Image: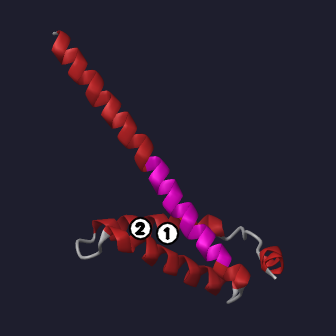
Amino acid sequence: MLTDIFTQVQVHPQLVVVVPALMIIGYALKKTPKVKDWMIIWILLAIGVIASCIILGFSINGIANGIIAAGAAITTHQAYKQTMMKRTLECHEENNKTKEHD
């Protein structure tokens, strides 16, 4: 039964539009004071599923593509954030070492 469900799921090219849209919505939600950080993931998941179901129709494939789109948006944001934070920390550490030697 589970195999039958997975064979119905095909990643749709329209995700190219949905993923960046979810990233922008996530950024806007992050800047909204009344929205807690833990809620952003769930809001993006709901929006991703709804958008995907509108594009692909309400089906297993539509729901799965919405989940995939939300996951891609969240993962991309986290990868960017972790990379930039690591670079920033390394730069600060390097600057502090340079100041100590002066």
Cβ–Cβ under 8 Å for marks 2 and 1: yes
Q: Quadrant of residue 3?
A: bottom right
Give x and y (percent) for residue 48.
Answer: 55, 76
- In reply to whether residue 76 is colored magenta, the answer given is yes
Magenta region, main secondary structure:
helix
The amino acid pointed to by label 2 is Gly
Give SS at disc 1. helix
Q: Is residue 18 left or right of residue 86?
A: right
Task: Give the label on residue 14, or none.
Answer: none
Alpha carbons under labels 2 and 1: distance apart = 6 Å
**Residue bounds of the magenta highlight:** 64-80
Farthest residue toward the bottom? 58
Farthest residue toward the front? 1
- In reply to whether residue 12 is colored magenta, the answer given is no
Q: Which residue is mark 2?
A: 26
Q: Is residue 24 above or below residue 57?
A: above
Quadrant occupied by the C terminus: top left
Residue drawn at (72%, 80%), measured in percent from left and top?
61
Dot 1 alpha-carbon crowd within 10 angstroms: few under 14, some 14 to 19, many 20 or more? many
Number of dots carrying numbers: 2
Give x and y (percent) for residue 8.
Answer: 80, 78
Q: Which residue is nearer to you in this view: 26 or 38?
A: 38
Give x and y (percent) for residue 56.
Answer: 70, 82
Q: Which residue is nearer to you in this view: 18 or 89?
A: 89
Q: Which residue is mark 1?
A: 22
The amino acid pointed to by label 1 is Leu
Residue drawn at (21%, 23%), measured in percent from left and top?
96
Give x and y (percent) for residue 1.
Answer: 82, 82
Residue drawn at (76%, 75%), measured in percent from left and top?
9
Rendering colour mode? secondary structure
Dot 2 alpha-carbon crowd within 10 angstroms: few under 14, some 14 to 19, many 20 or more? many
Q: Is residue 41 above or below residue 85?
A: below
